[in-house]
Image: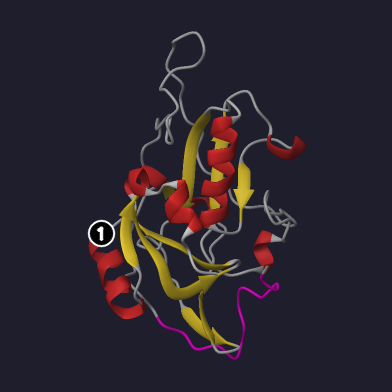
Amino acid sequence: MCDQRPADDGNTFRRRHFLLASAGVGAASLAGCLGGNEGGGDGGQTTAPTAVTIPEGATCEVCGMNIRQNPGPITEIFYQDKQPNGHDNPARFDSVWEAYQYEFEKDDAGWTDVTFYVTDYSSIEYRTFEEGGDTFISSNYESSAFVPATEVTYVVDSSVKGAMGRDLVPFSKASDAESFQSEFGGSLATHDEVTPEVIAGIGR
């Protein structure tokens, strides 16, 4: 759908937005982010795993593209008693909308997600850059860049693109999301407000 693009380019310009002095991943025991329950099958509490750094060569579960070779927000989903595409958890995605699409499908298939992590653009230094007439946002692959999806405000369908076109850009601070929306357009949504209809409506 979208050509592979380098996450960094020497000809792009830098813009620093909303860098926080410190930010933690938080919610070390978040569970059931998209309708799952807090406990396992026996009713006991499930402790959510922490986010992991995206390894070299990791590919998106949906489009198959190399995550580290593309810009934009990244997503990780840990599942209970399931291994996505034959590898260890988490399932990995080079866009947020693909992750939701995948999660909705797996939810219908009876999978239980334990934790749903997204890039937190409130806690990292990032840049937007122009390429081929489009505006893109940089990626961050480190574990410290992720935050539970339940803790963010998304800017949905702004003019800024990621690996697979327009996306949901996550911010743990609502004021950062509002500032981004003011500059780049789009609408605001929380995790609970992201539905299959919202994902289907994102322009790409």
Q: Nearer the viewer, residue 198 or 173?
A: 198
Q: Main secondary structure of the magenta part?
A: loop
Q: Quadrant of the N terminus?
A: bottom right
Q: Is residue 123 visible?
A: yes
Examine the rendered structure and indicate whether residue 41 appears above or below residue 163: above
What residue span does the magenta drawing correspond to? 2-15
In the rendered image, residue 101 lying in the magenta stretch gets the answer no
Q: Does 22 appear above or below 1?
A: above
In this rendering, position of residue 120 left or right of residue 7? left
Q: Is residue 146 visible?
A: no
Q: Residue furthest top?
A: 42
Quarter of the view holding residue 108: top right
Residue 72 is left or right of residue 2, and the answer is: left
Residue occupying image coordinates x 55% and y 46%: 76
Q: Which residue is mark 1?
A: 174
Viewer-proximal residue, 89 or 105? 105
Q: Residue at x 46, y 79 (%)?
A: 128
Q: Position of residue 137 (x, y in %)?
A: 49, 73
User: Is residue 117 toward the left or the right of residue 105 in the image?
Assistant: left
Q: Would you place residue 37 above or below residue 118 in this image? A: above
- Badge 1 element: helix
Crowdedness near tag 1: few (<14), some (14–19) or many (≥20) residues, C-alpha within 10 Å = some
Q: Quadrant of residue 35?
A: top left
Residue sitting at x 34%, y 47%: 193
Which quadrant does the C terminus fall into? bottom right
Place residue 123 in its image quadrant: bottom left
Residue 174, image x, y percentages: 25, 59
Q: Position of residue 75 (x, y in %)?
A: 54, 51
Q: Is residue 7 magenta?
A: yes
